[in-house]
Amino acid sequence: MTLDKTFAPAEAEPRLYEGWEASGAFACDPMSNADPFTIMIPPPNVTGSLHMGHALTFTVQDTLIRWRRMQGRDALWQPGTDHAGIATQMVVERLLASEGIDRRDLGRDKFLERVWQWKAESGGTITRQLRRLGSSLDWPRERFTMDDGLSEAVREVFVTLHSQGLIYRDRRLVNWDPKLQTAISDLEVENREVRGSLWHLRYPIEGEPGRFIVVATTRPETMLGDTAVAVHPNDERYRDLVGRFAILPLVGRRVPIVADTYSDPEKGTGAVKITPAHDFNDFGVGQRHDLPMPSILDKQARVTLAEIADVLTAVDGIADPDFVRGLDGRDRFDARKAIVAELERLELVEKIEPHTNQVPHGDRGGVPVEPLLTTQWYCNAAVLAKPAIEAVESGKTVFVPKQWENTFFAWMRDIQPWCISRQLWWGHRIPAWYGPDGEVFVAKDADSAATLALAHYGHAETLVQDEDVLDTWFSSALWPFSTLGWPERTREVDRYYPGDVLVTGFDIIFFWVARMMMMGIHFMGDVPFRTVYIHGLVRDERGQKMSKSKGNIIDPLELIDSFGADALRFTICALTGPGRDVKLGASRVQDYRSFVTKLWNAARFCEINGIVVNKDFDPATARLPLNRWLLDASNTAVAEASVALEAYRFDEYAATSYRFVWNTYCDWFLEFAKPALAAGADPVAAAEVRATAAHVLGTILRLLHPAMPFVTEELWDRFGYGEVCSLIGTSWPQPDAVDDAQAARAELDWVVRLIGLVRSVRNEMNVPPGTPAPVLLRDASPEAASRAERWIDAIRRLARASEVRLLDGEMPKGSAQAVLDEATVILPLAGLVDLDAERVRLGKEREKAAGEARKVQQKLSNADFVKRAPEDVVEENRERLAGYEREMERLEAALARLA
RNA sequence: GGGCGCGUAGCUCAGCGGUAGAGCAUCGCCUUCACACGGCGGGGGUCACAGGUUCAAUCCCUGUCGCGCCCA
């Protein structure tokens, strides 16, 4: 077979992925007796393409799912995509625009045909890209939020919630996106800081010529719709004006001056204009004071006068209906300029201050949102939120890291009615039909609605279906059960609901996690998942958020092309600590690619040295300390990795595996193995080393497989640990029985320290690596002596020793010395050792030991410490002190020998 | 304004009551028959600051400063 010098991901990855997929390795098994383990993929937008955020979240999920699958769980990782209402509609509209077509000309049905056509042609991008990452999703189960089954679930939920009074129609202010011309939910609004002005406007007091009440506003254009001025009830400045009227400039309407705690005496002038139809706070004031609520902006945010036409009144020097009529149809920002100019002309502007304020923008359309009074469908989220809050409080669902529960609670406890209707075409059409008189019939289909209408009217009536569609997140909220076949009672629903863990970013806790909790509990009677693992954001190397405008976007597919999916995945694991954002650049991935190569080369070494899989090998029979030590270290690494994964500590999982492979297996074990495998070595020992090397390499491949599936599978297959593409289905390593691991650890620890000591001294003495020198041991215990004897070949090789022996008599002149436990290591380096420098060096060593000893001594001489600290801590310190004192003695003796 | 998180080696980050760690970078030596995407060795930190609790604080508490995010 002979492995190439480096692993070739571009060739291996597609081949292995196809192999896994073809063998059904990704499939769950509903008929299995195994304990299920379920992760629902956060369905990416069907318009999406793989970005670093996806790479992070799906690497984490795939690592978990592969690990649990190896542990013998019946793993379901449910794939699918989201129809992404607004995003998809925008993509297709843009496409049509390039052909010079407007969707309105095309008509709803034709347009939807085009969207489906687009989906068929281009909707598979993201799922293809997920495969390149190595994602072991159960593809035959792939779902789409608009497919028949999921649409059925949506209708079922809508109709049920409606019948329970939890979905209803309401006329109230809604966030309106004038660009997309649809209502959006509170969550789809993001506040952006905008530098603008604060206009102080004079509203004349009725019946008192020359007296004004000055209101401060950031939105002068909405004054056309003002129906009151509000002041704080305790504000002395305006006390006499409450209950009287102001004349609304330009319009000429009489507006009452009302007392309401909404106005803040500290802010502006303490008096605020009230436009109930275009501001959420003003709407509240309007309701409390029973004010008219005329809309003066239309759905495109242009001035419309229909609702104020009849109040327009000419007032000399104050209001001019003709001016106002001239504003009809003008854009809100145009109108603002014109209105301010006119007010200035009328000397009704007191002053204009520069002002920075938070302006709500639509997160998709990117333009300022306009609060608009419309009738929409709402979901009573407050009722649904209650059991969801309780579920987290009681620990039925746990957030990791736990602090995110606070975020969840804060939002859920103050949840607002959820506006679920959207004035779009692409999405789940609302299952509501209207009779000629506007009566609403909510039903799962037109026939059922007709039946309801018949019962209501006593005769058949023509019904018209609601034009609107549902918020995309409405169907996403059902994802944990709708994907399993609900509302049908399938085996999958019984078996895979609730899921085990939901993996996602904090940015969609509200959008998605909270809503799945609400819907899951309401319809399934149980939470949708036991654990919510919240990971951070991917940022660039300097910690900046990635964005198109900054030009700092890193494309995961390019990283995969350059370094392989394993390198990218391992990097992500290594950098994913709890509650931390992931700062990632190409150089980090390149660094971890070295680890992939290191593993590959370790395997090459094995191959070259005739290390082959030996299925008959029983680790419990290993006799050599080297092998027992390695097996023990391997047990530790696997145990630590399991604990780390259990706790979602991907960073620790990566670190433990990395250390074990690189430091333990490669740097020490394989180096120690070299003399044991050399020509002329004991063949029985060599056979045991080979068997152990192969056994532990197998453990390593299994250990790393969840993070680095490709290279591990390739090596697994090439070495014949199992059938081709079988590693994915192999069991997670179990601890091996190791005979007297304690003794093996002690022995190898001693050899490693001895070699380290010799290397260190030689380096400091500038002994060229090519120059061997003797290693002599003085005052060595019989145990140390026999270890030196047993490990002579390894010490020769790794410490460049020409010989290793005990020293009884005089120390050769010009020797360097170092202390190892009770023994002193002597390196005769005649001509290389500067006696003075050596004295200084040993002196420093002694000082270091003395310093440590002083610190410990100080502690121990503190009566409170000895009295109050736990006995084992005191004892440990006593032992440390003894150790330092012994070391000082040896160093003293070494110094004396130099004289 | 409210809430959350973070300030530990040049960089990225672990550790979170009892001897300050890793990776990368850096410096020196080494092209030794798996690997220069490598090997060996070294240097580098008053753990943001100030108080407090404790026998003992990087770790717990309080405050201050700086940075970031979320909500208003």
Image (cartoon, coloured by chain):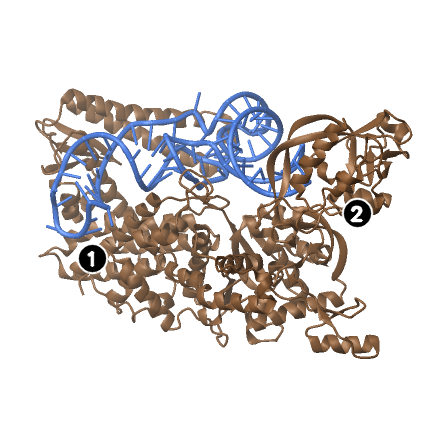
Chain colours: A brown, B blue
Q: Which residue position holds label 1?
A: A604
- Name the image quarter holding the N terminus of chain A: bottom left
- Name the image quarter holding the C terminus of chain A: top left
Q: Chain of mark 2?
A: A
**Which of the two labelled residues, at mark 2 and mark 1, occupies the earlier sequence position?**
2
Q: Give neighbour class at mark 1: few <14, some 14-19, many 20+ (Cα, 10 Å).
A: some
C-alpha span from label 2 to label 1 = 79 Å
Q: Is residue B9 left or right of residue A388?
A: left
Q: Which amino acid does the dot numbered 2 rest on?
A: Pro
Residue at point 79%, 49% (across, down): A307
Q: Which mark is residue A294?
A: 2
Q: Is residue A251 left or right of residue A77?
A: right
Front disc: 2 or 1: 2
Q: Is residue A46 above or below residue A831?
A: below
Residue A138 coordinates in the image, percent (x, y): 45, 68
Residue at point 27%, 62% (across, down): A11
